[in-house]
Amino acid sequence: MHTVVDKAQLSPNVTRLVIEAPRIAEIRKPGQFVIVHRGPGAERIPLTIADADAARGTITLVIQAVGKSTEDLVALEIGAAIQDVAGPLGKATELIESGHAVCVGGGVGTAVVHPIALGLHDTGVKVTSVIGGRSKEWVIFEDELRRAGEVITCTDDGSYGRHGFVTDALKDVLDAGGIDAIYAVGPVPMMRAIAELTRPYGVPTFASLNAIMLDGTGMCGGCRVQVGGKTVYACVDGPEFDAHAVDFRELADRLGTYREFEAHALEVAHRRAAEKADEAPLHAPTGSCLIPALAESAEKQEAAAAAGEASA
């Protein structure tokens, strides 16, 4: 069991949970993730390790509530426990060892890029972080990223920081020269826009693909993506890949496959809660509960895109 020791609301639908996971906290590296299973009957949810404290034996998870399973997770209070946390999974991010790197985060992706920025800083790399949100209330992890270096904040409505998209700010940084690598995490449209922006500059660009995942071992094949014309698996071969080689169109299509299924599951859950029904459990239409974790991950990506696409 993994006890929740701290909880904070970061934005209208993003919550930070700090949980006990001493073994994971001790060995995790930037870019790695865990698969969380709240308890019996719950789905398995992949979440990037946003931070860790080996001395306390804790890891930090940042969760965007967009479906039933993520809503259940963020409903946990301090003292509650998560039954299973498997990890660390995935390959650690390949960090450059010198020079100047730019970390770009959109929406909840800002929390995902945080450990990468800190890892770069710890190796002596100069770090500039470019983060964005629709408005000030959607901007997260700004203070945490300042531990790694300069932070440029963008909002779509101009309510905070620079008025505009993260790509606008990134272009200015690239035009100034001296950039050795770009690390991007956020909605698929944002990462795709960044890949196209950086391509003519010839700057190596890495995208963290929060693709559909289920088992975290590559066995299910749900996280497969096309990179450089080859099929790879985000959970074991990634999650970071060369953004200039990723087939973002195919990835976006696959992430939307289970959107309708998850929307139905969430509607049923809300109806049950509202009615406080005692009758037998309601059932989704045939087929709509297949691979529920895929539905959850797909809905997470679509909601993130809706919240952060304008920030591209």
Image: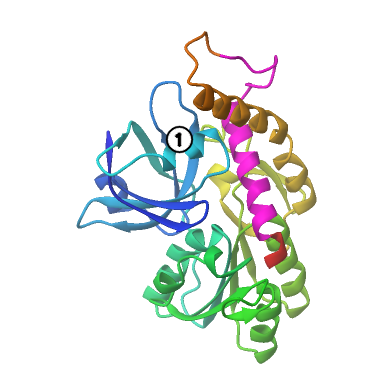
Name the quarter where the N terminus is drawn: top left
Q: Position of residue 51 (x, y in %)?
A: 37, 58
Q: Does residue 120 lie above or below 218 as drawn?
A: below
**78 relative position to 11: left or right:** left
Q: Position of residue 279 (x, y in %)?
A: 51, 9
What kind of residue is marked 1?
A: Asp
Helix, strand or loop for the magenta stretch, by majority = helix
Which residue lies under the disc numbered 1? 72
Magenta stretch: residue 296 in it? yes
Q: Residue at x 65, y 48 (%)?
A: 303
Using the image as rendered, state which of residue 271 and residue 168 is in the foreground.
271
- Crowding at label 1, few (<14), some or many (≥20) Cα neighbours within 10 Å? few
Q: Residue at x 77, y 49 (%)?
A: 229
The picture quadrant where one finds residue 56 is bottom left
Using the image as rendered, state which of residue 190 and residue 177 is in the foreground.
190
Extreme residue in the top direction = 280
Q: Position of residue 55 (x, y in %)?
A: 20, 57
Image color mode: rainbow
Label 1 SS: helix
Q: Residue at x 71, y 60 (%)?
A: 309
Extreme residue in the front direction = 275
Q: Which residues are magenta?
A: 282-308
Q: Does residue 1 lie above or below 153 as drawn?
A: above
